[in-house]
Image (cartoon, grey):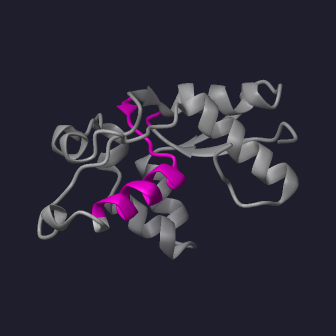
Amino acid sequence: MKGGTANVIGPIDAPHEFIFVPDLAETLIALSEKEEAYGKAWNVAGPGLITTRQFAELVFGAVNQKPNLRVAGKFMLRILGLFNPFLREVVEMHYLWTTPVKLDDTSLRQLLPNLHKTRYAEGIRLTIDAMRTGAPTAKV
C-alpha cells in the first residue's frame, strides 16, 4: 500500500485463476446446503485467467503505485527454504507456478447457477478497502 516491493513466486507470466476468498466461502456454504453435492469433488474456478504479473499490476495500480516485484524462482526457493520451512514446502508445489492453472467448474455452475465470481479488480479494491479500515474483507 506504501509502494514497497512485492515478493512473488515465479515464473510470473504463466496464466492462472485466483479465487476471492469470500466467493469461495459463499460457494462452500452453498455446496453444503445441496445434498447432491456430497461425496463429489468440485472445482471452483476464478473469474478468468490472469498472470501473477498482471495481478500485481492491478494491485499496485489500485494504490497508485508503480509495480515493483521481487521474483523468487525454484532455485531461490530452495535457498530460502534452508531458513524457512514454509518455503521449503513451496518448492514441492512449484509446478503450480510454471504450469498454467485453469479449472473447469462447469458442473459446479450447473449445480449453483447463481455462483458469483468477483472480478480481480473488484476483489483487489475490496481487499485494499478492508486493509485500510482494518475490517474483514466483505462485499458491498
Residue 43 percent coordinates (x, y):
24, 49
Answer with left or right where residue 37 lies relative to residue 136: left
Where in the figure is residue 110, as x and y percent of width and height?
Answer: 19, 40
Q: Position of residue 80 (x, y in %)?
A: 55, 62
Q: Is residue 122 above or below residue 31?
A: above
Name the residue at 61% across, 29% down.
121
> Based on the displayed image, in which of its 4 quarters is residue 66 positioned?
top right
Residue 17 figure quarter: top left
**Total labels drawn:** 0
Residue 103, compared with residue 94, is above or below; it is above
Q: Nearer the viewer, residue 102 or 108?
A: 108
For the point 62% across and 32% down, the residue is: 122
> Residue 67 vs residue 9: left or right?
right
- Residue occupying the point 68% across, 54% down: 137
Quadrant where the C terminus is found in the figure: top right
In the displayed structure, does residue 63 sit left or right of residue 24?
right
In the image, is residue 24 part of the stretch drawn in magenta? Answer: yes
Q: Position of residue 50 (x, y in %)?
A: 44, 27
Dividing the image into 4 quarters, which one contains the N terminus? top right
Q: State the image quarter where residue 120 is shown.
A: top right
The reply, left or right, for residue 81 in relation to residue 29 is right
Q: Nearer the viewer, residue 120 or 53?
A: 120
Give the residues in magenta: 11-31
Front-lying residue, 56 or 62: 62
